[in-house]
Image: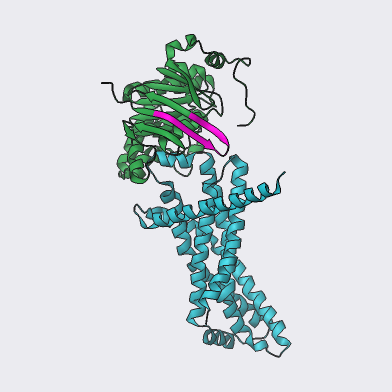
Chain colours: A cyan, B green
Amino acid sequence: MNIFAAIGRVFLNLLEQIGALTTFTISAVTACVRPPIYGALIGKQVMRIGWFSLPVVGLTAFFTGGVLALQIYIGGNRYGAEAIVPQIVVLGITRELGPVIAGLMVAGRVAAAIAAEIGTMRVTEQIDALTTLSTNPIKYLVVPRLVAAVISMPILVAIADSIGVFGGYVVSTASLGFNGAVYLKNTADFVTQGDVTSGLIKAAVFGFIIALMGTYNGFHSKGGAQGVGAATTNAVVSASILILAANYILTSILFAK
Amino acid sequence: MAKTPKIELRGVKKRFGSKIVLDGVDLVIEPGQSVVIIGGSGSGKSVTIKSVLGIVRPDAGQIFVDGQDVTRISGRAREAVLRKFGMLFQGAALFDSLPVWENVAFGLIQGRGMARKKARDIAIEKLAKVGLGPEVAQLSPSELSGGMQKRVGLARAIAADPEIIFFDEPTTGLDPIMADVINALIVSTVKDLGVTALSITHDMVSARKISDRIAMLYKGKIIWSGPTAEIDASGNPYVDQFIHGRAEGPIKMEVRG
């Protein structure tokens, strides 16, 4: 067993993957701006990606806001700074936790579903069938999901932001002794438009990552049920890692002063 | 001067990694002919038809459709050529998210932009041609048996009045009676529509019934081709072994697919 050959094979395989992903991304993005655009399919995907993710995203946002309030209160207590809870909650939620938590939840839910659906279509030759019926599979399957995810995610995150702040409010007023009106006033006075927009920009990018990883892995799945399973796992793992990496990069760009 | 062949393959080669699948395939199909490619599993039959359709891109060689070199075309030019084709997939490859009639009408609605109502009427007419009543139109493909799915697949293949139809293992997975029904449907469709047909199969009963000519693919090459009536007197030991289904002979089973 030659160790150099093994390393070389891994490296070549990696390059091949990057190349395939790049070509796929380019053809998907160019297909987004070229007719035909399947409007009805985009609408259907907005329902599946956005609307049906609302309960899970809303619940996680609520509890995240609540636990954030609790931790800041306990931590702030050490310096006599408990009063800062509303400000930190709204900042943490809008800038980071809203988009990241929503992104990860949607990645788990939607990237998996997309990869499984398209992967099954691949192994049962439905994607080849699309081609023989003069329909471009990228336009018919990939574009609607990409566009729908980029539209849905900012809306989802805007809702998650509100619910997250509400979670912090509920915990603060119910068990930490805050006055509700003061809490809301402090929140509203402190948060800036930039805090919210930066989170929504992140959300759109995360939406793109989620749909791209779901469709790419589904498209390239092979070998029956096991292959579809692997594609689903890869979609969720790669989408989650890319979301966290992109989050760091976006934060450093958006908040560069 | 001889007629232009409907489809011609010249020295088509394709390899996946280190595995050579097609090793210089030469095949000529005259207009109106029904040609069957026989060969064992993994002999490259599917890759041959997928090369003609452009789903698989050959490494070397040329493919002509109506005298036009289609080997390296893509985009709109490819879509224009694909309009001449209809294809029945091995597992039928029906879109399980759509009802039967929309499957049949898919190429008309998505590929050619026909109004849904008109496309639906045509779909019901095509379903009748394959012996299915209008009550099937509203069903979902998953509610149908394998043989019924093949019929719907056939209706979809002929929906846009193609000049060429490909049949991928049309009788695989069906009971002998349903297989004969499908064979008879193929024969009558090819005759009635006057189309050129290319089928791949390892079912000799089906091959004899639906073909004018038979070509045998072995190790990526066409090792014999001739009129169906002459196959019993081919004088080729590989062909003899295959058509009689003998375990003993020059063809050795390959363990790796």
Toward the viewer: A211 or A4? A4
Would you say the magenta stretch is mainly helix, strand or loop? strand
Query: What is the magenta range?
Result: B9-23
Compared across the picture, whether B255 is left or right of A44 comes to: right
Q: Answer above or below: position of B69 versus A238.
A: above
The quadrant in which residue A109 appears is: bottom right
- Asked where in the image residue B9 lies, by quadrant, the reply is top left
B216 is higher (above) or lower (below) than A235: above
Question: Residue B105 location in percent, x, y?
Answer: 37, 39
Furthest toward the top, the residue is: B233
Which x, y percent locates residue B12? 44, 31
Residue extending farthest left? B1
The N terminus of chain B sits in image quarter? top left
Q: Report whether A49 appears left or right of A73.
A: left
Q: Position of residue B50 (x, y in %)?
A: 45, 35
Q: Which residue occupies the extreme bottom position in the image?
A: A80
Q: Is residue B56 magenta?
A: no
Between A57 and A94, the one nearer to me in the picture: A94
Q: Residue furthest right?
A: A78
